[in-house]
Image (cartoon, helix red, strand yellow):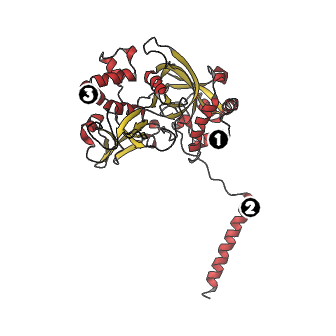
Amino acid sequence: MPDSFPRRLTGLVLVAIGAIALWWLIFGWPEKELAPPPPLTPPVGMTMSQVDFADLPGWQADGQGAALAAFQTSCTRRLTLPADRAVEPVMVGGTVADWEPVCTAALAMDVTDDKGARDFFESAFTPLAVEVDGKAEGLFTGYYEPLIDASRTPDDRFHVPLYQRPPELVTVDLGEFREDLKGRRIAGSVVGGRLRPFASRAEIEAGALSGRDLELLWADDPVDVFFLQIQGSGRVRLPDGNILSVGYDGPNGRDYTSLGRLMVARNILHPDHVSSPIIADWLRNNPVAGAGLMAENASYIFFRFLDGDGPLGAEGVVLTPGRSLAVDRAHLPLGAPIWLETTHPDPNASPGPDAPQIPFQRLMVAQDTGGAIKGAVRGDVFWGFGEEAEIIAGRMANRGRFWLLLPEKLAARLLASSSRPDS
């Protein structure tokens, strides 16, 4: 009797498993109920309208294979994420599932075939004209990888710390708490169970982080460090000639203040003469006043050493010179192709208000963000490393516009939602 009961119980379990298996063979396994797709609508004040690729100025003249290569880097990372993961801002970017078909197709494409790349974008995407409060134009600037001199140890020459991220610094994605804050982040440290503002630039430079062994390197010029923080990544030349790459590892969470705007408002510089090289020269020629001016930008960036082919953008992929664009992720989804029409300074011409500008019509990919990049029609072109990149990026502050490319089905949902009377 004691032995027969377990055998009967085992037999019943096997019968149940067999019945379930038979049901699965006949009727199929019940599908997991998928969550409904998120509602789509542009952020407040922003409108999007469908256009044809023929309406994009210079579309046929671009070599879209280079843009496809940049898009592939975004897709390689995106396809590692869960299908239901939101692509911020979710009201425009949808979810990873909305991008999976175009990303899978893109990764099978030949980036050396410009015509094939162009045909791919035309067949898989819908271009959308972007406006804010009826205005299509905005400001487009540039950034690059600067080269600075630094040492692993401090001395009389190398005395300016380049800090790594403090362990207590916390970054919070506000979109996880409120839908209307999607794409917004804050940073601080937890004190007494509450998130408090982290030390400002002035406080850090006054020694708020001293004595904690957080110095990554020691530079010889505070102005170089300041501009490295603005660029977000760069290269460091050590005294022995070796070159290291350093990249962005988070902000202190304080608001960014533009030195150029401060200097114009205080009549230090004329609006037509504002550029990174001119600002840097003034700061070096006026070290006391310059230090005070830099301290007014409370934002501070922390760094880490990088391995690999280049700097990483906010999307977590290597940036492509001339094809990666920093945008405001509260308005535009990272990883999205963007057709940009603007101009950039001629690197071979003398700077000045009348310096010639070169037309720039190119397919870009939104792969980065920046403290100064705020608003829907606003962008920062990554120019890469070297003297020419530094010249163009340092002088670029030009008007332009862009068109957002979304996968066809995602664009159709967005346009349908936007056209509803209650949207």
Please rate how many residues cluster around mark 2, counting C-alpha atoms within 10 Å: few if below 14, some from 14 to 19, many from 20.
few
Quadrant location, the N terminus: bottom right
Q: CA distance from mark 3 to mark 2?
A: 75 Å
Q: Nearer the viewer, residue 395 or 150?
A: 150
Q: Nearer the viewer, residue 115 or 386?
A: 386
Whether residue 298 sits left or right of residue 113 in the image: it is left
Disc 2 secondary structure class: helix
Quadrant location, the C terminus: top right
Please rate how many residues cluster around mark 1, counting C-alpha atoms within 10 Å: few if below 14, some from 14 to 19, many from 20.
some
Q: Residue at x 64, y 20 (%)?
A: 55
Q: Residue furthest right?
A: 26
Q: Residue at x 26, y 37 (%)?
A: 156
- Disc marking residue 8: none
Question: Does any portion of residue 142 appear in the rendered image?
Answer: no
Disc 3 secondary structure class: helix
Residue type pointed to by label 1: Leu
Question: Where 268 falls versus 410 (above or below)?
Answer: above
Which residue is label 2 attached to? 25
Q: Earlier in the sequence, mark 2 or mark 1?
A: 2
Whether residue 109 sits left or right of residue 200 in the image: it is right
Residue 202 locus on image (x, y percent) = 27, 34
Residue type pointed to by label 2: Leu
Residue 375 locus on image (x, y percent) = 46, 27
- Disc marking residue 107: 1
Quadrant hosting residue 335: top right
Which residue is label 3 attached to? 292
Q: Earlier in the sequence, mark 3 or mark 2?
A: 2
Q: CA distance from mark 3 to mark 1?
A: 49 Å
Residue type pointed to by label 3: Gly
Question: Where 239 falls versus 289 (above or below)?
Answer: below
Whether residue 215 sits left or right of residue 337 in the image: it is left
